[in-house]
Structures are given as structure tokens and as C-alpha cells.
Amino acid sequence: MQVFEQENELKEFLKKARQEGQSIGFVPTMGALHEGHLSLVRAAKSENDLVVCSIFVNPIQFTNAEDLEKYPNLLTEDKQKLKQEACDVLFCPTKEQVYKEKPIINFHFEGLDQVMEGRMRPGHFSGVAVVVSKLFNIVQPNKAYFGQKDLQQFAIIARLIKDLSFDITLRMQPIVREEDGLAMSSRNMRLSDTEREIAPKIYEALVLAEKYWNQGASLNEIKTQVALYLQKYRIIKLEYFEIVHADYLTDVEENLRHKPIAFCIAAQVGNIRLLDNIII
């Protein structure tokens, strides 16, 4: 695996690869890699000649300074995991290399960035859009791979690619779960033993919602049942549960239940904030 810290060196390497006719798959990450990330690398390997993974903890997408400070730095372990997956290229720049000066550009997505995560974390998706745009311009991949767990992020990036005419095919890979259903996340390692035991109840609430949906329950009834289910666990604080169109994240109307539909949830387990969703 080739490891690059300098943007210009990576660009030169990838320029030669493109001249040789190699297709490039790109997996952008913030490190602390788990099986979910590695599934993206495998998908990229199956569809491209060359796979580039980036590890960069993007400071401008954090709306909570404590979250940024506590984000795990496991670069040595991450490199080993990527080597085991036969990843071809790792790009791990410093903050100073990515942001030579503080960016002043801001992105707005006409409401797409105002719901769910956007409502809870104002400015988050602008920070995501800035760094993803920069990485796309540096790597210039044929295909880029993101996970379903961050469904709203995927919708934002899909719009970014469309509106800015990036010549990139976007791929979404399914959520990878632990045996008890908990969606894999870098945040899971911060859960205490008690919190880790309770955290899968978030996924169970989504499964319950799907059951009620299939039984024809009203949207309000589904939301009520999810809230009641999670109220039984005192260390879980539900932030939101939304029923939306999976592609556009717009609200589903009671009489228009066209698939694909996404059930999206965010909850605090202790002090750790977790996201999950299912698409039906």
C-alpha cells in the first residue's frame, strides 16, 4: 500500500494511474476504521483497478469541540487494516495541508441540510461538503463509496456531485451491524459496558417501526410506539425519529407511502450520540 501525506505527490501518482487507463475508487474516512469502512474498501476493490482511502478528521464539520477532541486517532491500526484489505493507496494529510487557510465558503442545500442532523448540528453539512469537494478535486475518482448509516450525508453528497458536475459515480453500501444489531460506528468504542448492552435497542426500535408500518399503522402511531419503546431505557435519550423518502429525505405523507422509505433515528446513549436507519 502506498501512503501519501502530501497532496502534490498523491496527485502525481494518480495522474500516472489515469494515463495508464486505471479506474479509481475512493473511500473517504475519518479513521478509527471498523468493518463498515472495510466493506466500502472491498466494494471499491471489486469495481475499480485502484482503490484510494483517505483518513482525515475534518475539524470544520464538528459542531461540538469535545467530539472533535475525543475523536479516536488510530492511524497505526488503520494502516494495518487497510493493508490486510489490499487497499492500494492511503492519503492521510494534516489539517494544515487540507486547510492552508480557514475556508470562507459555505454550502446550503435548500432544506436538505436543515432537517434531522442538520437541525441538531447547524453548519455540519457545509463542513462535510467543503472537505468532500476538496478530496474529490484531489483524487478525481471514477467512483466514490459511502455508507448507508450516514444516509443524510449520502443525500448531501449526491446533490453536491450533481450541482457541481463532478464526473463521479456515487455508491452507497449497506449498514454493517454487530451480531446484536448495533450499527457499527467509531463512536461505539466510547460506550461503557452498560451503554453497549443497551445501545442495540435503537436498532430494535427501527425494527419495531417497520413492523407497525407493514401492519398499516399511521405515521403518528409508529412514531409514538418508537418513543414509548425507547422510554423504557433511561440511559437512551431519543433526539429524533423520522419517516422520510430515502432519496430526498422529505416527509412521507400519510396517503403516499411510495418506497423507498427510510426510518431514521438519532439518540444519546449516555453521553454518546448514535445514528441508525433502515430503508424499506
Image (spheres, helix red, strand yellow):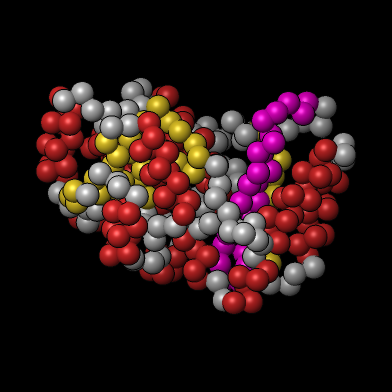
Q: Is residue 104 above or below residue 75?
A: above
Q: Is residue 11 left or right of residue 80?
A: left
Whether residue 127 is visible here, answered yes or no, is no
The answer to whether any part of residue 181 appears in the image is yes
Position of residue 71 in the picture relative to residue 98 (left or right): right
Residue drawn at x 73%, y 26% as measured from the top left: 258
Out of 95 and 18, give the one closest to the viewer: 18
Would residue 124 be found to the left or right of residue 77 on screen? right
Image quarter of residue 212: top right
Q: Quick one: 25 or 97, which is closer to the camera? A: 25
Q: Main secondary structure of the magenta part?
A: strand
Q: Position of residue 187 (x, y in %)?
A: 50, 63
Residue at the image position 52 percent from the left and 32 percent from the top: 110
Residue at the image position 15 percent from the left and 24 percent from the top: 19
Q: Which residues are magenta?
A: 256-280
Residue 257 image point, x, y percent: 77, 29
Q: Nearer the viewer, residue 113 or 75?
A: 75
Asked if residue 245 lies in the magenta stretch, the reply is no
Q: Is residue 46 left or right of residue 96?
A: right
Indicate the position of residue 166 as horizontal and vertical percent values. Answer: 34, 26
- Quadrant containing the C terminus is top right
Q: Does the stretch in magenta take in 264?
A: yes
| Picture residue at 33% right of the left edge, 23% below the top | 167
